[in-house]
Image: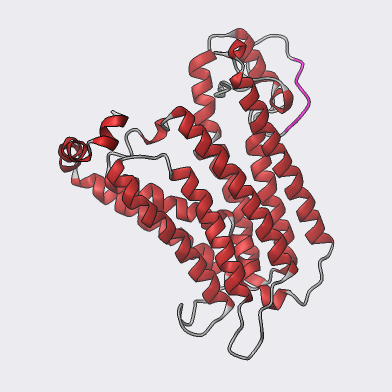
């Protein structure tokens, strides 16, 4: 079917047309509502990051608030443009890669625009904070994006999109949500970049360095976790097994723990310059935690693991003795009569 989709586009379109035409109108309405809510959340977060200021004019007088709002606009535009070919081909292969491109594009855009000359005659001013936190974001996005793109090329598909990609309104809503995801997750960095000129006068201090250290720890945990899982899955002897070695011996989702930790570090470093409503940027690490723990990450993988190994007493013992997120010492339970967590993980 994949070959058919790419080498016979006319036939592919005619096959999909009845499905799309037959969709209940309610699905279109739901897709529009979800996209609208995602846009609303993006605007609300930007309003907070701009310290309660609306832009005077997105393309008029340059001001930090204008830079921040334009950055968020770029986040959505990148995803909406990518949606067009993705919807035509009904493919999700470039979804995660587009997410990384969005992070990089918005980070560079806000960094450059925030440092650009203003009408009062000031020249280019790149703050140390902006450069450091932007570099962290770009390194993380490029690493994760290439990792996820390589994985989907190997797997050829992402099962999460099987029903979504044949429904254009839902598919569009997902791409819009990705713009919101980028906005909420990297809000602290975009704020620092947008207000870079005014922040440049403030020297780096303890808060900055603590944030940088936390980011480095989180990034290292995420990279090592992904590498260990890749090596484990590549070993034919581990086929059909869950991973319980390396960092995965101490946490069922160490990669998620690393990601949450690094964004917490970004927020802490950026907070050295926050004023008033900008403290609402705390939504960034909270959002990442809630997203991974309660929505798209842990619940989905835990459920899948339970389906695969839920009848295995050793697996239930693994669940009982292993922290779901934070890297902690192993528990010492020896029976599974009353497992603490009845859920699993997609270890391979």
Residue 330 on the magenta segment: yes
The residue furthest front is 7
Residue 303 on the magenta segment: no
Name the quadrant containing residue 165. top left
**Side of 300 where 174 appears, left or right:** left
Image: magenta residue range: 327-332
Q: Left or right of 87: which side holds 121?
A: right
Helix, strand or loop for the magenta stretch, by majority: loop
Q: Quadrant of the N terminus?
A: top left
Please tell me whether residue 167 is drawn above or below residue 50 in the rendered image.
Answer: above
Q: Residue at x 53, y 60 (%)?
A: 105
Residue 192 lies left or right of residue 10; in this view the side is right
Q: Quadrant of the C terminus?
A: top right
Q: Residue at 53%, 62% (x, y): give it.
A: 45
Image height check: is 24 above or below 59? above
Q: Residue 121 appears in which quarter of the rendering?
A: bottom right
Give me the residue at 79% from left, 50% from top: 213
Relative image position of residue 27 (x, y in whole percent): 25, 45
Q: Position of residue 278 (x, y in %)?
A: 63, 67
28 left or right, relative to 56: left
Res. 234 in view:
yes
Residue 343 x, y percent position in the rendering: 55, 22
Point out residue 232 in the picture as x, y percentages from the top left corner. Answer: 64, 21
Q: Is 320 located above or below residue 298 in the figure? A: above
- For image coordinates 67% across by 38% down, the residue present is 222
Q: Nearer the viewer, residue 57 or 296?
A: 57
């Amino acid at each position: 079917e994949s070959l058919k989709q790419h080498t016979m586009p006319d036939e592919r379109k005619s096959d999909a047309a009845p499905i799309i035409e037959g969709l209940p109108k309610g699905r279109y309405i739901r897709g529009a509502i979800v996209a609208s809510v995602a846009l609303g959340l993006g605007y609300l977060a930007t309003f907070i990051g701009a310290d309660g200021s609306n832009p005077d004019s997105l393309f008029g007088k340059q001001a930090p608030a204008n830079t921040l709002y334009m950055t968020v606009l770029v986040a959505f535009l990148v995803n909406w443009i990518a949606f067009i070919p993705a919807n035509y081909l009904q493919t999700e292969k470039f979804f995660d890669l587009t997410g990384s491109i969005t992070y990089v594009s918005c980070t560079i855009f806000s960094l450059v625009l925030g440092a650009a000359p203003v009408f009062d005659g000031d020249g280019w001013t790149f703050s140390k904070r902006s450069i450091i936190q932007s570099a962290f974001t770009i390194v993380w996005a490029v690493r994760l994006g290439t990792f996820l793109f390589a994985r989907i090329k190997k797997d050829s598909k992402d099962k999460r999109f099987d029903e979504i990609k044949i429904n254009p309104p839902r598919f569009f809503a997902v791409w819009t949500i990705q713009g919101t995801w980028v906005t909420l997750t990297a809000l602290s960095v975009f704020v620092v970049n947008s207000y870079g000129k005014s922040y440049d006068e403030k020297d780096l201090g303890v808060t900055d360095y603590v944030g940088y250290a936390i980011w480095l720890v989180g990034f290292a945990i995420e990279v090592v976790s992904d590498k260990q899982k890749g090596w484990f899955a590549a070993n034919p002897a581990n086929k059909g097994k869950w991973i319980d070695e390396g960092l995965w011996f101490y946490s069922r989702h160490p990669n998620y723990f690393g990601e949450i930790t690094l964004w917490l570090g970004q927020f802490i470093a950026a907070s050295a310059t926050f004023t008033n409503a900008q403290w609402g940027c705390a939504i960034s690490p909270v959002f990442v935690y809630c997203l991974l723990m309660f929505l798209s990450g842990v619940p989905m993988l835990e459920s899948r693991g339970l389906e695969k190994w839920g009848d295995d007493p050793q697996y239930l013992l693994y669940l009982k003795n292993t922290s779901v997120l934070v890297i902690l010492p192993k528990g010492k339970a020896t029976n599974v009569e009353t497992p603490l967590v009845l859920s699993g993980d997609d270890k391979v």
